[in-house]
Image: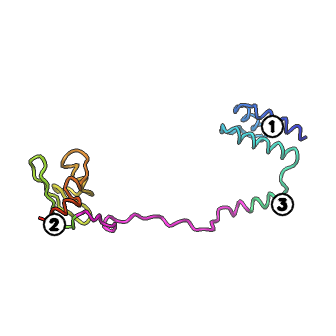
Amino acid sequence: MANDLDDECSRLQQATVVALRQRYAEVYGESPPRTGNKTWLRRRILWRLQALAQGDLTERAKRQAALLANDADLRHIPPPEPRTTLAISQEPRDPRLPKPGTTLHRRYQGTLHTVHVLADGFIYQNTTYRSLSAVAQAITGTHCNGFLFFRLTAQEKHRAQNR
């Protein structure tokens, strides 16, 4: 009997996926599975052949397995709380940003552009933007750093304070 399983194991090692699916259907008496995983097919076939040759699980073991399966969906640790995103006004404000109510002016290609700073964005030409970079992009037509475009770097602040 052990030799039969050893021989079958050797045959299954050489079998193609199609042959393994066919053998699975014969052993289990159902339609062939769609999987192409050779290792899974071999293991399932060999387990079934061994169970048929040497006997399946006892009724007591089957009942115990069924009880364990029924309790499997119980959680011992509650799921984590869903993460909520903070509103823009609750996020820490970048210290490089001017205070809300400030008006920024920038001359670009001969035109003076004015931007009003809000607590949660910026207004430029009656449109609200979430970032200075978005405003700079609207002005220039290309992506650029809003802090650099409006000259809000630490060096510029230091120069403005010393004037």
Q: Are marks 2 and 3 in contact (CB under 8 Å)?
A: no
Whether residue 85 is in magenta: the answer is: yes
Q: In the rendered view, does 112 fall on the left or right side of 24?
A: left
Q: Earlier in the sequence, mark 2 or mark 3?
A: 3
The one of 43 and 160 positioned closer to us in this rendering:
160
CA separation in Å, label 3 and label 1: 29 Å
Residue 38 lies, with reference to residue 106, above or below; the image says above
Q: Is residue 16 above or below residue 107?
A: above
The residue closer to the viewer here, 31 or 97, is 97
Q: Which residue is mark 3?
A: 60
Q: Residue under label 2, please give it.
A: 161
Q: Residue at x 79, y 39 (%)?
A: 27
Q: CA distance from mark 2 to mark 3?
A: 85 Å
Q: Quadrant of the N terminus?
A: top right
Q: Name the kind of residue labelled 2 in the image.
A: Gln
Residue 32 left/right relative to 163 = right
Badge 2 local density, few (<14 within 10 Å), some, or many (20+)?
A: few
**Magenta-drawn segment:** 68-97
Closest to the observer: 92 or 157?
Answer: 157
Q: Is residue 24 magenta?
A: no
Splitting the image into 4 quarters, where does residue 146 fall? bottom left
User: Answer yes or no: do the residues labelled 2 and 1 have beta carbons within 8 Å?
Assistant: no
Q: Earlier in the sequence, mark 3 or mark 1?
A: 1
**Residue with the mark numbered 1:** 9
Q: Which labelled disc corresponds to residue 24? A: none
Q: Position of residue 131 (x, y in %)?
A: 26, 57
